Amino acid sequence: MTSVHDSALDDSVVVASPYQRAVADYWNAERNPVNLRLGEVDGIYHHHYGIGDVDWSVLQSPAEVREARIVEELHRLESAQADFLLDHLGSVGPEDRVLDAGCGRGGSSLVAAARFGCRVDGISISQAQVDFANEQAKRRGVDASVRFHLRNMLDTGFPTGAFQAIWNNESTMYVELGPLFAEHSRLLRRGGRYVCITGCYNDAYGLPSRAVSQINAHYICDIHPRSTYFRELAANRLVPVSVVDLTAATIPYWRLRARSGLATGIENAFLDAYTGGSFQYLLIAADRI
C-alpha cells in the first residue's frame, strides 16, 4: 500500500503498468474542446456525458450564437448527470470526507463540496488533470477542503475507513473491477455509500459489439460487461441499493453533440451501441456492509 505523502509521489510511483502509462499519457496530453469549451461556461470542468431532454431550439438559434447555445446546452446536460450521481450518495454532511476516484479536471468534486460542505479528495493518474483541478479549487477559494492528488485508484494510500462516500463517474473502464472495488471497500466506513455511473456492454448481446470496440479504441479503455459490476461488488461487501438504467436518458445528449461543432467522430459509435442494445449507461449505488 502506497503510504508516502503526495509531495513525494511522482509519475513512476503512481503509474503501475504499461497500460496505465498509456492512459496517463493520453490524459496528460488531452486538450479536447468538448471538455474545455463546456467547462468554460461556468468554470466547472466535467469529464463525462449528459442526461435529460434536450432543448432542441438551440439548433434554430441565429448563426452568431448557435454554437455558444449548443455548448451551454451540452454543459447543462452533463451538469444534470453530475447532480443525479450526487443525489445517490446518501447522507453526507460537513463533517464527512468523500472521494472522487478518477476525478478528471475536478468538476464533480467541486459540485459535491458546494452541495454538502464536506471535505473532498479527488484522484487521477494524470498530473495535468490534478494540477488543473487544484487550480480550479484555488480560484474558487475551496482549496483548503477540496484537494486533488496524483494517486492510483487501485492503491490510493489513504487510511482504511476514511470515507463516507466514494464515486466513479465514467472512470471504471480504465481499471479491473475486482481490485477497484476491493480498494473502495477498504476505504469506505461501514454503511458508507459507493456510486458509479458507467457505460457497460450488455451481456445479453454477447461479446462487445463493433461499436463498443470502437469506443474502447478511441478512449484507450476496456468497457466491462454489466455482470462483472454486480459480481465484483458482491465479492467486496458492496451491496447495491439502487440501479438506474440511464441509456434512454443519455441518447439525446449524443444526438445533440453529433450535430455540434464539438463532435469528435465517436458520436455515431455511441449512438449505434446505445440504440442497438449492445451498450448500456447505468448508475449503480451500493452500501458498504
Image (cartoon, grey):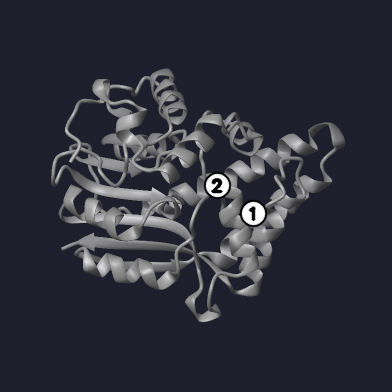
Q: Amino acid at mark 1?
A: Tyr
Q: Tell me the quadrant of the picture where the C terminus can be found.
A: bottom left
Q: CA distance from mark 1 to mark 2?
A: 8 Å
Q: Position of residue 106 (x, y in %)?
A: 43, 34
Q: Secondary structure at mark 1?
A: helix
The residue drawn where x is 28% and y is 65% is 233
Q: Secondary structure at mark 2?
A: helix
158 and 11: which is toward the camera: 11
Residue 78 circle label:
2
Residue 253 circle label:
1
Q: Quadrant of residue 124?
A: top left
* 199 left or right, relative to 156: right
Q: Are marks 1 and 2 in contact (CB under 8 Å)?
A: yes
Q: How many marks?
A: 2
Mark sitting earlier along the chain (1/2): 2
Q: Quadrant of residue 1?
A: top left
80 and 220: which is toward the camera: 220
Judged from this view, the residue extending furthest toward the front is 18
* 11 left or right, relative to 164: right
The residue drawn where x is 53% and y is 37% is 26
Q: Is residue 209 visible?
A: yes
Q: Is residue 45 visible?
A: no
Q: Amino acid at mark 2?
A: Glu
Q: Position of residue 260 (x, y in %)?
A: 75, 45
Q: Is residue 83 above or below residue 248?
A: above
18 and 276: which is toward the camera: 18
